Amino acid sequence: MPLRKKGLLGREEGIFFCTTGFHKQRRLLLGDKYYRIILKSLGFLKQKYNFGVIAYVIMSSHVHLILFVQKGTTLSDIMRDFKKFTAYKIRKQLEEDKEFALLNSLRIESCQEVTPDTTGKEVTPDTTQSSVPWGVTS
């Protein structure tokens, strides 16, 4: 979720417009059951956190939300859990629907692991790791 004013994420209370998209703007919402995943996630989070959904638009590649966040809740908590839950559920639904070509296209090919260097020598990324599947990002 790119934010022009990243300081807003820790704020409590207010009305926020949020847009979050899927990895490389892929069209992952392939039908009604995928849209229901988004709505169920919002419904669950409304009960878990103290916020209201003023408006939403669900597109096949991204989601727009206008949220009223009340005191005691932060936007970052809501968006973190929303992305985590929906990423998992959408990936599981894609697997169930045997959308393996789409899932494979979401693999991050250049995943690099960097370990901290305590010797003072230059560290190079480990590129021997295989691709890491990662369903939904912003």
Image (spheres, helix red, strand yellow):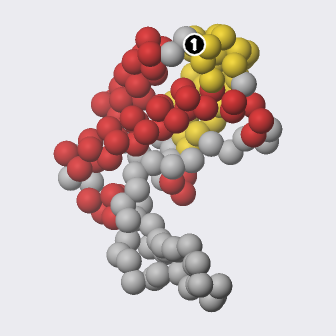
Q: Nearer the viewer, residue 114 or 91?
A: 114
Element under disc 1: strand
Q: Position of residue 30 (x, y in %)?
A: 36, 41
Left/right placement of residue 124 relative to residue 40 reads: right
Residue underneath mark 1: 51
Left/right placement of residue 47 relative to residue 116 reads: left
Residue projecting furthest to the front:
119
Identify which residue is drawn at 51% across, 49% down: 137
Q: Position of residue 100 (x, y in %)?
A: 26, 59
Q: Quadrant of residue 101?
A: bottom left
Q: Residues within 10 Å of mark 1 (few under 14, many from 20)?
A: many
Amino acid type of the residue tagged 1 in the rendering: Phe
Q: Position of residue 62 (x, y in %)?
A: 54, 40
| Residue 68 can be seen, yes or no | no
Q: Position of residue 108 (x, y in %)?
A: 45, 67
Left/right placement of residue 56 relative to residue 16 reads: left
Q: Indicate whether 30 appears above or below 75.
A: below
| Residue 42 can be seen, yes or no | yes
Pick the quarter of the image with the N terminus: top right
Residue projecting furthest to the bottom:
121
Identify which residue is drawn at 51% across, 30% down: 58
Left/right placement of residue 113 relative to residue 75 reads: left
Q: Nearer the viewer, residue 124 or 13?
A: 124
> Across the whole image, how many numbered discs are drawn on residues?
1
Identify which residue is drawn at 36% across, 26% down: 36
Identify which residue is drawn at 41% across, 25% down: 41
Q: Indicate whether 8 appears above or below 23.
A: above
